[in-house]
Image: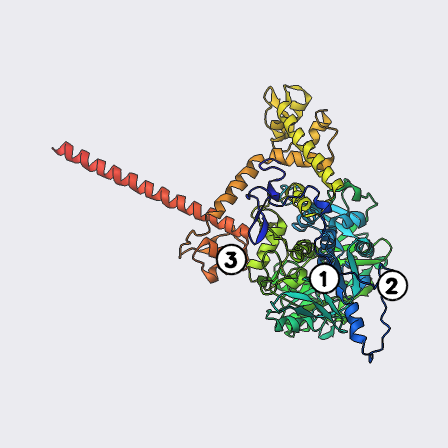
Amino acid sequence: MVGFSPHSLSRARLACHCTLSLFSGRPLLSCPNAARVPFRRKHGRRSFAFFGGRRRFSVSAASGSPGWNNHIDAVKEKYDVIVVGGGHAGCEAALASARMGAKTLLLTLNIDRIAWQPCNPAVGGPAKSQLVHEVDALGGDIGKVADRCYLQKRVLNMSRGPAVRALRAQTDKREYALEMKKIVESTPNLSIREAMVTDVLLGKNDNVEGVCTFFGMNFYAPSVVLTTGTFMSGKIWVGRTCMSAGRAGESASHGLTENLQRLGFETDRLKTGTPARVDSRTVDFSGLEPQRGDEEISWFSFDPEFHTEREQMCCYLTRTTKSTHQLIKENLHETPTYGGWVEAKGPRYCPSIEDKIVRFKDKESHQIFLEPEGRTVPELYVQGFSTGLPEQLHLPLLRTLPGLENCSMLRPAYAVEYDYLPAHQCSRSLMTKNIQGLFFSGQINGTTGYEEAAAQGIISGINAARCSDGKPLIVLERESSYIGTLIDDLVTKDLREPYRMLTSRSEHRLLLRADNADSRLTPLGREIGLIDDRRWKLYQEKQARISEEKERLKSVRISGGDLAADVTRLSAQPVKDFSSLESLLKKPHIQYKILDVHGFGNKNLTRMEKECVEIDVKYEGFILRQKSQLQQMVHQQHRPLPDDLDYYAMTTLSLEAREKLSKVRPQTIGQASRVGGVSPADITALLIILESNRRSVQEQRRQQLLTSVKDESGQVKSKASIA
């Protein structure tokens, strides 16, 4: 890749952790056959087995028998890693751990709800798609399953730069869960068990030893990953009515919060919600705006084996009306948040419809998307319409939307509040600071979204396996990946609302694009044992083709002809004689496909590889400049901030950043960067403003000095003439 080698981002340094950074030294993880590294930890032989599994399980002694305890000891279940929770974080954690050779146990409340998508059945979107690509580049599965189970795919922000383009897939909810369940069930070294974990078991040195379930069953392991989602003391609200549940139709988990509090962890409450589902057969689509998928399908996974072309379904766009807004305003007091009986914070960037009406009073309407939940079910997901209003108001509210005037509601909307543990209690490896071997991932850390959960899950799974095996832990620096940015934000800032990944949260987003995720992270995935020989060969061949093509574009030159004429017409810039193909690609509005049209393209490259080449060539200068800015940023941490800065006047900062900085009044850039709600992109903007102010002051002083010199010169001349 232009600006850095394919391997530079996988280089690591070893201290107490093994860290991945854009500017680190040569790799310290070295395994020629990393995909087949054996796991060192060994356990004694066992004589039991689950039914249908590899071992027989038999306890015949009565409870009063003297030998009962001996039988219990004989069937004591020991593992290398235990993962609690079978959601998107739990699946990635368990799969990563097992594939690295660790004997892994996945404990979940309901095996039939593994990798369930309780809210919008979709994967990707701005910044989230970068996370999915990065998880895939490391050897994870969320992207592969989405590529197999999509209903529709679209690349968003295509009119903008490559840093913010994002693939989004509407997925078949049931098919997605079944596909991921098959993968989990068929993975060697990975066992699954239904259980509700209530206690974390500790050893004498405050290290984790395992977990205890509601029914008193102990499972032992030196590494435990908690991925509890919205289930810890979960409570569902519909208007003023509530019930104990982690999500609709599934019971909450009780006891674990209290156990963690006794172990010294701080806990708090967060809230999220999901909209009603309507029957597609009762919706009039004739007047709605169709939102069709892309004709050319894009993929999350870098592995072509999982690229499955299938017929796409259509989504539709409708909007709220004056009647919608009026009905909500009249009943705000009936919602948990505005009624005052729920104080937990909800997601800022995925607000309920009542939050939108209150916070954006100047807007006459809001976009609402109707999206299918599967190929064989009539359910439509009403995106952007989550609410905490009583169920009696749901259908009247839905029927204020154009196209839904006669709709039938299949499932009501609800809000859910749950316990989480502020992630500043974790290190960047996602291991807790207080307890050796205990890791947190997903919504327990205060995030929202399947993609954020999966990204944390694969890192915690990798590190749980390495911790169990006595190896140094992996840390991704924020300049290496969106995953690194996500985790750094979580553990550095005291966040008190659900965290959602945004492209604006990364100051390095031009370097951290979706198209180059494999060049940044696949070498690391290989080194730690998640990328097998087949996948590694595919990666090496791809990088070789891209490198050769960029050299070819530099060497091939043209003079005149149809290609030059077309480039001149499209870019409005003349083409000089003997111009290289590389120089043509650097011109505005010129894409690689124009080379294909005129026979100068490379037929051996895939569409994704041509896109990589085009971006690397076209944005080479910007990429080098951003790397330079990144290096300067390191030296700016102790730069003082003037006391009289007017943050509210800095319109390039986000509104949240202006509010927080005005309130805290940090003394240095480093301190400002640690203020909750201030993103790295805000710090970059602040540095630009400070530099602009410095130059303005410097220019004023220079002008004053020139004026002073002129005045002194005039006085000297005047005295000379008098003399």
Report the front residue among 118 and 287.
118
Answer few, some or many: residues within 10 Å of disc 2's Cα (few below 14, many 20 plus, some between 14 and 19): few
Look at mark 2 in the image and give the residue it sits on: 51
- The quadrant of the rendering that contains the N terminus is top right
Distance of label 3 from label 2 (alpha carbons): 52 Å
Q: Establish if 53 lies above or below 74.
A: above
Residue at 79%, 64% (x, y): give it: 193
Marks 1 and 2 in Cβ contact (< 8 Å): no
Which image quarter: residue 546? Answer: top right
The vertical placement of 306 against 322, above or below, is: above
| Viewer-proximal residue among 268 and 310 | 268
Q: How crowded is mark 3: few (under 14 residues within 10 Å), some or many (20 or more)?
A: some
In the picture of the structure, the residue carrying the numbered disc 3 is 674
Looking at the picture, which amino acid does disc 2 mark?
Answer: Phe
Q: Dot 2 lies on which element?
A: loop
Residue 427: name its quadrant.
bottom right
If you read the primary sequence from the N terminus, does the residue marked by circle 1 or circle 2 appear first? Answer: 2
Indicate which label's residue lies in the foreground, 3 or 2.
2
Tell me, yes or no, if residue 289 can be seen here: no
Measuring 57% from the left and 44% from the top, which residue is drawn there? 22
Contact, mark 3 vs mark 2 (Cβ under 8 Å): no
